[in-house]
Image (cartoon, grey):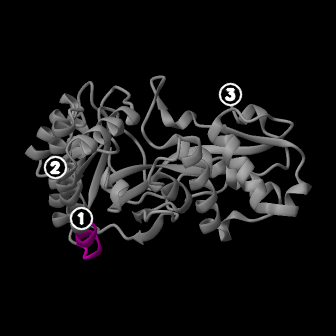
Amino acid sequence: MSVERTTLVGTPMVIAPGKVFLVGEYAVLEEGIAVLAAVTRHAVGQYIPGLEPFSPVVAEAVKRAKAELGEAAAALPPGSVLVNTDAFHQDDQKLGFGSSAATAVVAVGAVFESAGLAIASRKPQILAIADAAHRASQGGVGSGADVAAAVHGGLIQVLRKPGMPPEVTPLQPPPGLHLVVFWTGSAASSKDMIDGVARFAKKDPLAYLHVMDNLREIALRFSQELQAGRATGAVAAAGRYGKQLAVLGAAAEVPIITEAFTRAADVAKELGGIAKPSGAGGGDIGVAMFATPEAARLFARACQRPLSALDLDLDRQGVHLRSGHTDESENSGLFHV
């Protein structure tokens, strides 16, 4: 359904970005850090009086946002939030940019704005509500890293401790880091990958803990290299992380690293960079990293079917009110196509 065709005059419209994992997939589920970038693929939401929620995540987000408002919620007429996530699709397939997380965030944001509460000054509160709603709608699982990216935008480090909302640390990308986000041409089920890894953890807990220790250590090194401004070191750490994901996939007997990712990694290696899955793997989205813009652009041009480089940029704002005809962030220089 098109949000543009159902917009109510005077009802605030809220947008929130998707994300890509640079490192930290799986490790963030075991109290490791993840580093993510919010990207300019946006969910758009608007509170519509009389509307019934169209998905469990919207229902949970609206319910919890109204509960947080307390008496102020009485000023809102009964209704729900209409969310458009068309930007999270390509060739009629959903891309792994975290559409459900962005949906939870815009739903909470739209309720707040419709009740007269500005979301710009309430991001920690929005993160806590949207994270709880997102986890509840997914059976209590998930790191909340994608929710954090949708709320805060930019390049962030996320740590999840038991029973707590995600801890978010903003990061500055070093000038020498250059990324290409690519699609493998096929969708993937994150649940299937995560379920397979959970079976491995149960079957061989010592081996699982060893792999997780390695993933946590490498993710931390990646973040340290970023914060020190060492793009080459960060790229090298991300390459090691990708290799450890392959180890995890082999041990868990799930295809985290597919043939398409292997092909992308080979091309990136020839250009002095790395390529790895972004997220649970098994297909879908990948990210390539380089220390020069020329290498990044060459990689993007070298992507051949089923691989395709995606045109996007860093979203610096996170969840915010929509204004004008565009909500694209200015060119960050971080992403190339």
The circle drawn on residue 207 is: 2
| Helix, strand or loop under label 1 | helix
What residue would you read off at disc 1?
222
Name the residue located 37 percent from the left edge and 54 percent from the top edge: 29
Residue 256 at x, y percent in the picture: 25, 37
Residue 262 at x, y percent in the picture: 16, 35
Residue type (three-letter) at the residue carrying disc 1: Phe
Q: Give neighbour class at mark 3: few <14, some 14-19, many 20+ (Cα, 10 Å).
A: few
Q: Nearer the viewer, mark 1 or mark 3?
A: 1
Q: Report whether 236 appears left or right of 123.
A: left
**Residue situated furthest bottom in the rendering:** 228
First in residue order: circle 1 vs circle 2: 2
| Helix, strand or loop under label 2 | helix
Name the residue located 67 percent from the left edge and 71 percent from the top edge: 121
Name the residue located 29 percent from the left edge and 69 percent from the top edge: 174
Q: Real-space Cα distance between discs 1 and 3? A: 40 Å
The circle drawn on residue 337 is: none
| Helix, strand or loop under label 3 | loop
Residue 275 shows in the view: yes
Q: Give neighbour class at mark 1: few <14, some 14-19, many 20+ (Cα, 10 Å).
A: many
Residue 331 at x, y percent in the picture: 43, 57
Name the residue located 23 percent from the left edge and 28 percent from the top edge: 304
Residue type (three-letter) at the residue carrying disc 3: Met
Q: Report whether 200 appears left or right of 325.
A: left
Residue type (three-letter) at the residue carrying disc 2: Ala
The residue segment tinted magenta is: 222-229
Q: Real-space Cα distance between discs 2 and 3? A: 46 Å
| 13 or 127: nearer the viewer | 127
The answer to whether marks 1 and 3 mark residues whose Cβ atoms lie closer than 8 Å is no
What residue would you read off at disc 3?
1
Quadrant position of the C terminus in the picture: top left
